[in-house]
Amino acid sequence: MRNQLLTNGIDAIMGFCNNNRTPETAMKYQEACNAIKRIYSKHIMKHYDKDLTEKTMLATKDRLSSCSSAIYTADRYLFRTLCMMRDYFNGRPFKDKYPLVSRYKHELEPFFEEWANEFKASLHNKALTIPVLYSITRDFFYYLQLLEMKDFNCLSQDSIYAFLQYEYSDHKGCMGNVMYVTRLLCEYLRSGGYDNIPLELLPFTLPPSRKKVLPAFNSSDMERILNKPNRDVASGKRDYAILILASVTGLRAIDIANLMLNDINWTLLTLHLVQHKTGFGLALPLDAEAASAIADYILRGRPDTELPYVFLTSMKPYRKLNDKSSVANILNKYTKLSGVDKSAYDGKSFHAFRRSIGSWLLNSNSEPEMISQILGHQSRNVLKYYLPMDVSSLRICAIGFEEIPVRSEVYQ
């Protein structure tokens, strides 16, 4: 990577964009490349410089995070181009997407990235479980990267135990998963010839997982959020349709991202889909207001394309919203704009829509079977997730002190 000309990276980026992007989009990347040239020229540099690139990326990211517009600005293309340049000069292939917030906390060097991906490929768990295990796997190899430990025979009980302590702050409620992945990693590395890796982890007892009672959106918060999308523009029509649909159905973010045009029965105003999480079919009535919002987006905001999905990106090349994080980020944007109080891990995520639906159904004395059907669960045990938010029902269950002899005035 040392003493490589900046123009080599720019030529590679533009070659990729000219072959894989529309001419209009490729022009945006060309403008971003020109901006990078000007930045390097200002610092009198012709060769790629890691520190300058990272500094420029952080400044660009800060500007984007403070921008409330849904339109892709020149800074968005600049950020993507800087990410592509970093990948090129680190010997990594270009990616189709460069999100502002990575789904993974840490950037791995190519050596550790390769090991993490090879371990991921060896897993035979359920498809929905593998991303969770892979995230912990990346944490493991990032910890080894911090230790500069490329000879895995140097792994000892002490270093493994130190990794578990390192993970505890972010995985207090799921250390069982961390232990499970760490054991799999030790077995995998031993099978690869690293015989000095311990067979057993240090014995210690995990405390029971603490279950947080996460909140639902109240009606006031919901109204403030739904009032924020600008329904005069295409992206606002899409965002409003997504939010109103989630608020009246409790659909998971991934199911909204995967919703297809033929999943909607406009005659009966119903939705028919297969849930991504469970694989089970789900049929739901479509609220008139949500139906109107979706129709408005399809007729007046959705790009003219043969793609079968309802909700698409607003810029070329058009594609479906790729996963649940794309939909969740829409909620995060309007939660911030609406001024609704939100902090890290406070439960006011996209899943709060489901908790809202569950608590409202409980308050309306709906039958457990109906609640399970609407939320797409196969068991009525779903009630245990929503009862903690139903204060009136909890009061009925509460036991007083009338039958307990009180010898002092402590309880009065």
Image: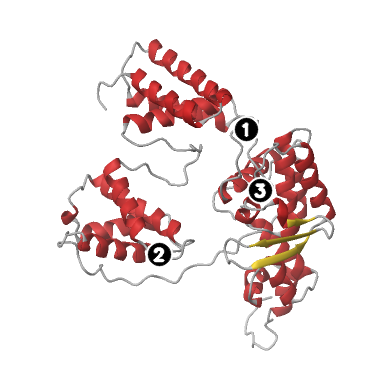
Of tags 1 and 2, the one toward the viewer is 1
Q: Which mark is residue 309?
A: 3
The amino acid pointed to by label 3 is Tyr
At label 3, counting other C-alpha atoms closer than 10 Å, the crowd grade (few under 14, some 14-19, many 20 or more) is some
Instruction: Tell me the distance, in whole angstroms, between the alpha carbons under discs 3 and 2.
Output: 34 Å
Q: Residue at x 19, y 62 (%)?
A: 197
Q: Position of residue 2 (x, y in %)?
A: 25, 24
Q: Position of residue 300 (x, y in %)?
A: 78, 37
Q: Which mark is residue 259?
A: none
Nearest to the observer: residue 142 or residue 401: 142
Quick one: quadrant of the N terminus?
top left
Q: Assign a secondary structure to mark 2.
A: helix
Q: Residue at x 40, y 11 (%)?
A: 42
| Residue 24 visible in the current orientation | yes
Q: Assign a secondary structure to mark 3.
A: loop
206 sits left or right of 393 in the view:
left
The amino acid pointed to by label 2 is Asn
Per the image, the residue denoted by label 2 is 177
Who comes first in sequence, dot 3 or dot 2? 2
Per the image, the residue denoted by label 1 is 315
Of tags 3 and 2, the one toward the viewer is 3
Q: Position of residue 241 (x, y in %)?
A: 74, 46
Vertical arrangement, residue 213 with respect to residue 76, above or below = below
The amino acid pointed to by label 1 is Met
246 sits left or right of 153 in the view:
right
- Indicate the quadrant where residue 178 lies: bottom left
